[in-house]
Amino acid sequence: MNPGSMKKYAAPAILCAAAALALQRVAGNTGQGGVIFLFAGKGWALLYGIRDPMVSLKMPLLSVLMTFMDHEPRRLALAVNAALLLLFFSAYNLGCMKGGKFTGALYALAAVLASFLFPVPQDPEQVFFALLIGLYLNVDAAAGEKPGPLRSLLAGLALGGTLLMRSTLALFPLLRAALILRSDRPRRALLKEAAAFLLGSYILLAPWTMLNYRLSGGLNPLESGRVVSNLVTGVKGSVYTMEGDAMALAGLRPGESVVKWAALQVAREPGAYLAAVVRRLWQVFLMFPYLVLLAAAGLWYRRKKPDTPLAALAAYFLLAHCLLSIEKRYFYPLVYLLAFLAAGGGAALLGADGGKSSGGARAAYALFLPVLGFMLAVEGLAAAYPFRISGDRISGLEAALKEHPGRPWLLASLGQELAGSRRAEEGLAALRVAAARGGAKYSELVWIPLILDSPRPAGIRANFDREFSAPLFTGLRQLELGQEGDGAKSLVEAYEKWNSYANMLRGTPYERDKAILAELRLKNRSFQDRQLFEALLYWPPARRPVLMDRLEKVFPLSGRLSLLRFMSAPPRPRDLKALAGLAGEADVIDNAGADERRAAAEQLTRYLLPLKKTGGYGGVPGAVFALLGKAETGIELSTAAFDSGPVSAEELRLLAGQLTGGSPGAAPELYALRPASPLYLYLSLKKPEEAAAALLKNPGLLLACAGSYAAKGDARAGLLAAAALGSGTLTPDQLRRAALALQSAGQYREALAAADKLAAALPGDWRALNDRGVLHMLLGDKKKAGTDLARALELEPRAWQAMLNLAALRLGEGLPAEADGLYAAALRCPGLPAEVKDRLTAPRSKPVDLQNRPH
């Protein structure tokens, strides 16, 4: 039998062996995704249009894909097994395009054997990433068979698709384009192909870049912050990846640039950094020594006819990872690249790399195009996301629950957000409903209410004993119940579990790595400042003080936990002195969240307000003090002023200085930072009478006070708005706020005068015309109202507010058909709030409310 016949009959035998091994390979997959399930929440945020600053932490493809797994291990196992089998088939097809069916069989067998270098895959991300790389290699090989701009574009799209899973290959398109330009075909054709390839590689990142820009204001086409730990520990010289607070390890505060820090560190000691890179390269060799040697042998044997694109991809993949600290699982796709190089060498050795198999290109595109369709759907979600989110995360979750009532993930997430926003009782209620709806698989958070309500929390713990959360919540509840010994044991167990999980070295503990790990553990304070802090938020404020007093006997309270104790209940004067001291500590306040700063500012504000002998508040300047002599509303305005924006660390320190006397003369600085605060105005001027006089010259402050009255339905809002109108020239925004406040007070003619000024100041602004049209309606001038509202719709055809107002007008004029048409058009508007949609779709017994509220 000649060699050609041997290869002809050997190919099916090798394929059968590969298929048998492939089935054995996938048989043990249980679909345990570990923390990968947590990223499904990012996918749901994209699907439902819920604000989530952590959406950018991971590229979107896996996040959306995991939503289809719906936290079901069986679904995940099926998805991973399907991906593995497709990967093995893509290996076979790639080999067929490289050298015929015998070569394809060798590629398939090499891929299956290489997969055994890892345990049964528990990291779906790496399996899916390897599949996407395999699909790219297929499409790239198809482009090589018949070069042209269109095929190069498709190859670029296939490579760009890998970036939507992980950003590892972000710079490889430049290298691949350079290899295209090295071909010996006409230069003009090569330039077109390279340009098309680069366009395809990066065009898919455009919606993601826009999403990141709309969320953060910065240009970032990749993940936000995911690489920080690997970058910091890698620059410090660690071989292996570590878990922990990498920013603290680098000595950086939140918001500081870790890339700039890394560049400076490398510039100071380039030799030490390069030595660490070499150590990592050697460590990767030790992970897969035989496979690396076989791949090197394959390259050497095919040195006269090398597979340069594949070799370049393998080299790039290896070096890109070794520039940072490494972790074995991230090299899962590399074993397939090395296996292909080895298989190519084996095929050449057996003289089987000269032929080609027909249909390989068609199979490559048949595999890739459905995946490209899914990628484009994800791109659509990313592109629409910035325009779909509105308000904060809580309002987004509440709106999504109206569309999808009872969805356990939405309920569990809402419970978590409510607790984090100091609304523990509401949060626990949402978690109880989530638990009743079967939400345990989505989040262990649903077990928290059971522990907080139980007299025997240790008995519930077994139901969600995952990582360190179970002993953490159990220990806190035991402390609350007075079981201090058991509580201390549970909390120590939680800390030990957390320490092994959150301060972990993912590899061999070399001496240098151990020293970095020790430094990391010393600087990582997140057990107190994050885990304990976030757990305590689930306790209603009235229950926290006793619990935290007992907790302090187990763990010394960090500054952030001390802030939480002061936030939990109305503090005594001596407590406020301590709070002022904390507010002066830079590391405490700089690391505090917005809610903590606002709560601390409110507590300090109440202490700074003058007290009457009767125990009430008095002498407080504010719009009511100036115009009506009512002190109680001044207090409300003073504390509510902080809701107009996040409290800065500088403001809080100045407030603390005013309280303790540590920053004499800080009041003018406070007033300059937040001039709309009655408290700051009072502190700056020292005397209420002077504060009142200054208030009359401050239209912005008067309107802030008027807005507070209007929100409460108090007619005195009109008096304050009128005072603002008479205090000087108002900006367009101030004119609109004055008109709305006057309207809420029933002073329609005065409101119309303000609306006329607004319309004159902003000609062509549909909102101004809409507001004036509503006032004409309220005054009974239907003709002018119709003119203004119709003009508003001409300027902005999607203005649902103007549609509803004009519909109400037409209904009042006895034109129900025209009104129904406007209501139907409003229902098609993309920005229509859910609660308005509910009113429109419900049986209508009266016209929809006038929509002249500020939007």
Image (cartoon, helix red, strand yellow):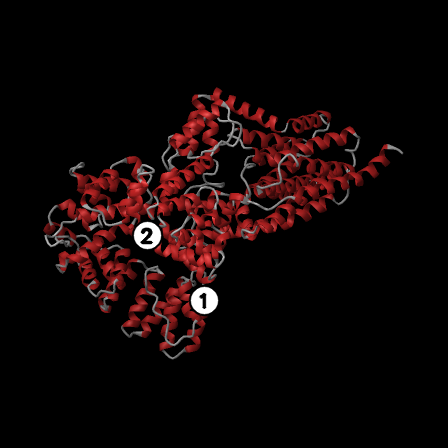
Q: Nearer the viewer, mark 1 or mark 2?
A: 2
Q: Residue furthest bottom?
A: 814
Q: Mark 2 falls on what kind of element?
A: loop
In the rendered structure, the answer to whether residue 323 lies left or right of residue 726 reads right
Above or below residue 312? Residue 200 is below
Where is residue 361 shown, x and y percent of the image? 71, 44
Residue at screen point 61% across, 26% down: 285
Q: Quadrant of the N terminus?
A: top right
Q: Quadrant of the C terminus?
A: bottom left
Name the residue that disc number 1 marks: 827
Residue type marked 1: Leu
Name the residue that disc number 2 marks: 540
Q: Residue furthest right?
A: 1
Q: Residue furthest top?
A: 271
Q: Badge 2, how many Cα within 10 Å: few under 14, some, many 20+? A: some
In the rendered structure, the answer to whether residue 507 lies left or right of residue 771 reads right
